[in-house]
Amino acid sequence: MMRILMKNFTDQPPTNPEYHFSNDLHQFITGKRLLPDELPFTKDLIMHHHQNGYLQFNYGVKDFTCNRCGNKDRELFASFHCARCGKECGYCRKCIQMGRVSECTPLISWSGPMLSNATNHGLLWNGTLSKGQQLASDQVVEAVQNNTSLLVWAVCGAGKTEVLFKGIEVALVKGQRVCIATPRTDVVLELAPRLQQVFPETEIAVLYGGSEDRTKNAALTIATTHQLIRYYRAFDTIIIDEVDAFPYSMEPMLQHAANEARTEDGAIVYLSATPSKGMQREVRKKKLYSVVIPARYHGKPLPVPSFEWCGKWRAKLGKGRIPINVKLWIQQHYKDGKPIFLFVPDIELLKKVVGILQESYADEAAGVHSKDKERKEKVERFREGKIKILVTTTILERGVTVPDVQVGVLGAEDDIFTESALVQIAGRAGRNAKFPSGDVRFFHYGKTGEMNRARNHIRMMNYWAKQGGFLHV
């Protein structure tokens, strides 16, 4: 079957039997498993490298197993009449968004020598870490040096990114490759300029859907977790930011991709303000080392959300009105010149709320959601103060920092607002040292257990911070 697979890949034998090593091909494919259509090189060049042992061809799909995403669920395979092999060919539907992997399509990877890309990876950062940050930074360095696993459990606004700097530098100076992966594109776009600023001489690949950096094979990669599906044994250190966030937390394929993208003895560091119950059990059982940062970098306590009943808010929206207490809350903060985040359960409700607010605030009110093509631009205008009120779904519960922002949740009792989501949403407020407090208001039509657990979670972190925090070993 592999001979058939290779035969179908190229109709003609190589025209030149003399082998010429291609550094461009090496740089493009190292650490990845790619489809033939993803390689911007001639078939002759690819076959030359394969015949000389520099490229390896592996089955994409075999025996109802996808060797790219790890899918083994038979219901997630289908077949089509394939022009390449002339047969009914099975393919994986699980990772179809990354390009079709079928029984007769090879996954191509580099199997030749690794070329050195030695360069200066100096860290350019003069900031000072808090006591909790320094403790966590030391643990990250130890994990990188010893190739172990570590959970950094840090409250929203603790300064998790700064905690990573020294560990990343240690890995890069050793000539290793590092990847920071996160479930959300917004977080990738926020992290990229910050990392480039502190590692100015390091090439950084920024990968997300539609990214122009897909051809880069950089020493430092910042990517959405979906992009890891193309990688195999590529990174000596993988850092999973917001490990509890959807879809990573709910999708075994993405967790499989992260494990496959890491070298066999590589380090993995998990970051989270709200680790899952399962991950917390791993910590208690001493199966996973963990360091906790219960205080923000500026040392001030997390804003504790207040609960405010707002009646049958859905019915009011249906009549073109916002609950009066929500309306007054917005008016007061707008009058005080403070930016306002208002979270709502879904896109349809968002459109209604934005329409009502724009009657009073015109273009100073806007909405963003997962399907919004102008999401990036709107968030930037919000940061610049051109948009005063930003209505959003949970898409912006993480990764977006705006000084002195006030945070409201309309319909906090909705199922979408889990403990984790509400903790993250509350964490948008008070992040800036100049504005360490903020008004966090959960408007609801009946309190839920998730709301109570979120508030208790925040209070618990504030208590731990007051006691000086602790470290799991």
Image (tube, rainbow, N blue to C red):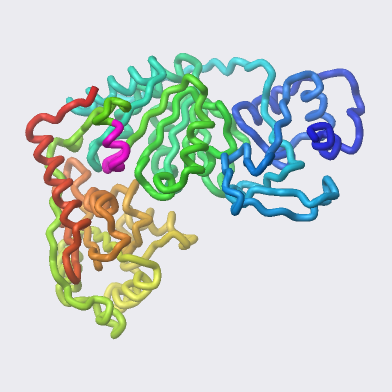
The picture places residue 271, in percent across and down from the top left corner, at 33, 35
> Relative to the observer, which residue lies in front, 359 or 252?
252
Q: Is residue 134 left or right of residue 40?
A: left
The picture places residue 281, in percent across and down from the top left corner, at 27, 35
Please state, as top left, top right, bottom left or bottom right, where the N terminus lies in the image.
Answer: top right
Question: Is 272 above or below relative to 322?
Answer: above
The picture places residue 296, in percent across and down from the top left corner, at 19, 37
Please state, as top left, top right, bottom left or bottom right, where the C terminus lies in the image.
Answer: top left
x 31%, y 67%: residue: 364
Q: Check residue 336 for magenta coloring.
A: no
Q: Is residue 345 left or right of residue 459?
A: right
Q: Exactly how many numbered labels are in the figure? A: 0
Question: Is 451 above or below relative to 460?
Answer: below
| Residue 149 placement: quadrant | top left
Q: Is residue 329 left or right of residue 196?
A: left
> Relative to the observer, which residue lies in front, 464 or 45?
464
Residue 68 in view, yes or no = yes
Q: Is residue 379 left or right of residue 155?
A: right
x 32%, y 68%: residue: 365
Q: Check residue 276 for magenta coloring.
A: yes
Give the residues drawn in magenta, as a range: 272-282
Question: Is 438 above or below relative to 214?
Answer: below
> Relative to the observer, which residue lies in front, 372 or 448?
448
x 13%, y 62%: residue: 307
The picture places residue 160, in percent across and down from the top left corner, at 29, 34
| Residue 241 placement: quadrant | top left
Residue 42 in view, yes or no = no
> Relative to the observer, which residue lies in front, 79 or 200?
79
